[in-house]
Amino acid sequence: MRVSNRWIIGAITLVFLMIHVPGCGKGGNSEAIEPATTQVEGSARPTNVVVHRITTEDVEEVFTLPGNIEAWEDLTLSLEQSGPIRWIGPREGERLKKGEAILRIDPETLKSQHDKNQTEYDLKKKHLERVEQLLREELVSQKQYDDARLTFESAKASLTQSRIALEKSTLVSPIDGILDRLLVDRGEFGNIGTPAAVVVQVDRLKVIVDVPEKDVTATRVGQKVTVLPAEVKGAAGIGRPGKVIHVTYRADDMTRTYPTKIEMDNRDMWYRPGMIVRVRFIRRILNDVIAIPLYAIVDREGDKFIFVVENGMAVRRLVHLGPIVEGKAVIHGGIQVGEDLVVKGQQLLTDGGPVRLVKNGQL
C-alpha cells in the first residue's frame, strides 16, 4: 500500500513538469502555445464619430440665486374706534377696491351723536352770525361776541370729533388687494389698536434675493432678470421677467450679502407670497465667441483637449477654456470657425487616427 502511494505521487509530479517546463508536451515545441498577436501594418479600423461644424454665437454668462416672494403690500389693519363690531362685509379671499368697507363698529350710536353735534353746530353758527350783526350795530358788547364765538368753536370741534369717530367706525381697505385674513368676528367688542384684518396686494410681487459680494457688482437697479419656480415636479415653463428695483449699499451683518428687491408681475395670481423661487441674473454677454459642449472636451492627466477631423483623420488640439455657461465652454484658441469638432466618439480617438463620420448622430 505504501509503494502504491509513492507511485501515484511520482506520476502527478511528472505531469506537472510536462505542463510547466518549456519544451515539454506536444512534441516539445514551445512556440505552439503562444497566441498569434502579429497584425498587418496599415490595417487600423476607423473610429465612428459624430462632428459639429464650429460657428460663433452670443453667449450670456448668468448666475442663479434663490429668492423669497413677498406681497407688494402686506397690511395689517387695526381698529381706530372702540365699540362692538356690528357688520362685516367681504369674506376672506375676496378682492377689495381701495376705500371699500371691511367692517363697521356701532355706527348707529356714533351716527346719532354726530347728528346731535351737527344740530348744535348749526344753532351756534346762526347765533354767532346774529351777534356779529348786532356788534356791527353796536347793540352788543365785544365780550358777548367773544363768548358767542367761543361757543361756536366748541360746537365745531365736537362736530369734527364725531365726524372722525363715525368715519373711523368703518374699517376700509387703503389699497386694491385681497382680504387675506379677518382677525375679529361680528359681535366682538373691539378696542382701538386691535388688529382686525390683513390685506395684501399680489397682482405684483416683490422677490427678495441675498446677493453675495462676488455678484453684487453685476447687479444694478433696472436690470432685467428671470424669475423661475423652485425645482419641483410640474413647475417647468412658468418663469417670468422681473426687474431689479433696489440693491442695498450695506451688507447684512449676519450673512454678508446684499438684500436685493425685484419687482415681478403676477396678474395671473400663479405665484404667492412665501414661495421660494430662483432668480437668474445676466452677469455679462459675450458676443461672437466659440462655445462648445463640455462633453466634447477630453481631460487626460490635467490637459484639456478636443479632436477635430481633417482629411478623414482625428487631429488633437489643446484648448484654453473661458467661462462655462449652461453646459457650454467658451474656447480661447485651439479651434477655428468652420472646423469639424468631434462631439461623439472622442474618448476613443488618438491623434492621427482614422475616423468615419456618422451622419445620423448615432454611433
Image (cartoon, grey):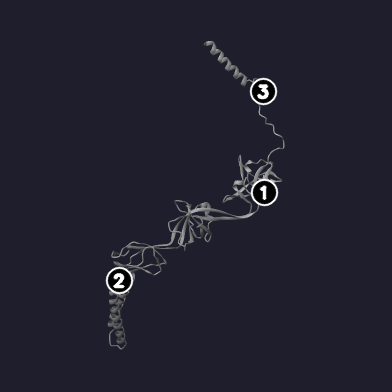
Horizontal and vertical percent for residue 264? 48, 61
Horizontal and vertical percent for residue 327? 57, 49
Residue at point 30%, 71% (across, down): 107
List the residue tagged with mark 3: 30
Element at label 2: helix
Instruction: Report whether 1 appears left or right of 83.
Output: right
List the residue tagged with mark 2: 107
Element at label 1: strand
Q: Nearer the viewer, residue 213 or 305?
A: 305
Instruction: Report whether 348 appears left or right of 194.
Output: right
Give the distance between the C-alpha atoms of the residues marked 2 and 3, in whole angstroms.
118 Å
Residue type beneath disc 3: Ser
Horizontal and vertical percent for residue 60? 58, 55
Residue type beneath disc 2: Pro
Horizontal and vertical percent for residue 351? 68, 41
Is residue 244 depicted above or below 163 in this figure?
above
Discs 1, 2 touching: Cβ within 8 Å: no
Q: Residues within 10 Å of mark 1 (few under 14, many from 20)?
A: some
**Pointer 2 or 3: first along the chain:** 3
Q: Residues within 10 Å of mark 3 (few under 14, many from 20)?
A: few
List the residue tagged with mark 1: 340
